[in-house]
Image (cartoon, rainbow, N blue to C red):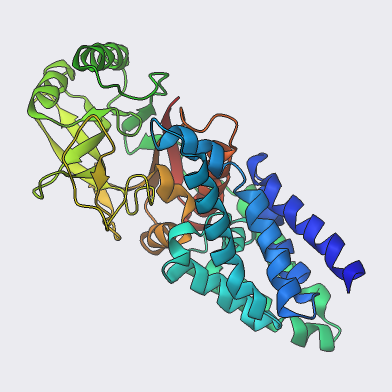
Amino acid sequence: MRNRLAPSVLLAAVCGFVWQYAYAGPILALALIPLVLFQRTRRSRFAVALAYYLAGSHGIPLAAAVFFGPGDHWLEGAALWLVSSALLASGWAFADKAWKAAAVMLLDALMPPMAFFDWISPLTASGVLFPDWGLFGVAALLVGISITPWLARKRALVLLPVLPIVWNLVYLSIPMHPQKGHLQGRIIQSMNLHMGPSTHSILENFNRLRSWVATADQHKKAKVLLLPETLLTWWPGNAHYIEQHVPHGQTWLVGASIPLKQPGMFADGIKAVTDHGSKRIFASVLPVPVSMWRPWHTPTGDSFGRMDYKAFWWQKPVVLDGKSLMAEICYDQLLPFSWLEVTLYRPDTVLLTSNVWWAKGTGAPQIQRASAWAWSRLSGSTDIEAENS
């Protein structure tokens, strides 16, 4: 038994760890399934899955120490890392059959609390295998996993990869999509920034605002300019300043903490800003749990401290110049249930906004990009990214 378990644990950990290297994570994620099914006991299946999730999310303690703000938060981050990995691994302990493994993948993606932390999900591989299939690609992946034992009994297992391979060759050889960033005559450009986080100083935050507005104002040729997540809090003075600086005929899509009607509650959203006004067009489906989304906490409204953000759970496309847009804001980019909404609507373009100043050395930005690549591929959408480091 030990001879069977040890190499499986090691290989599973490798499959989780490589998520931070290019697109290796989504490509190798499905290896978790045979590694789990190869085990004979619940304990060993749990151990293999736990190794995968612990290795894949190993950057959480370091990220939490920065993201959660001043103070000694590494214990909080370590607890989140261990508990979330154990939650995600728990279902795999019962996956002694292929169809059960498929069921675990689906339940983890959709059922709380696992769905709140279902990063590095093997379900993401549906975008690798079945690009442009949408929800049918997810169904094809789950069915393919479920019928694998039947194909093995029929000695026809070699047929399983034929369809994905053929379809990928067709997909890559035909120019199915418009050039990335084009939107029916209007060009969306993104702007990366290196501003870091906001501070407790009103003067420093205003200087920060003036700096990125001046940088954005240099993009004269862009009809639509995408900016990173939570660049500022959308107080009336800040909003007025930005509206005064947006060139005529141009639209800025600005990531902001947007005050809601409930006192002290904010949306991690995107404002569409022109020289004559602004409106919120997107909000994060699930801001970062524990740090941003805290439903157990009474909001204080402290715009310079740890703010409370609302989870919006469901988003719909926004039409701009006859083309549909959806947004995946920061943490949403890691969550299958958020991407399944994108896959359902299949927009023309997905806007990816994030802050990565807190994630240096954690692998989180690379995991976000790998996840976004695979899911955008599944929905047949182009994507455009703006991040603040």
Tell which of 188 and 259 is nearer to you. 259
Q: Residue at x 37, y 27 (%)?
A: 189
Farthest-out residue, right = 3
* Relative depth, front residue between 14 and 269: 14
* Observer-nearest of 319 and 174: 319
Residue 230: quarter of image: top left
Q: Which corner quadrant holds the C terminus? A: top left
Q: Position of residue 12 (x, y in %)?
A: 75, 58
How far across and down, in percent of the image, does residue 177 sit? Answer: 48, 46
Looking at the rendering, which quadrant does residue 130 occupy?
A: bottom right
Which of the image's four quarters has the N terminus?
bottom right
x, y percent for residue 167? 65, 61
Q: Residue at x 26, y 56 (%)?
A: 312
Q: In the image, 306: left or right of 62?
A: left
Residue at the image position 54 percent from the left and 44 percent from the top: 60
The answer to whether one can see residue 377 in this image is no
Query: Residue at 39% of width from left, 64% of height from top?
Result: 344
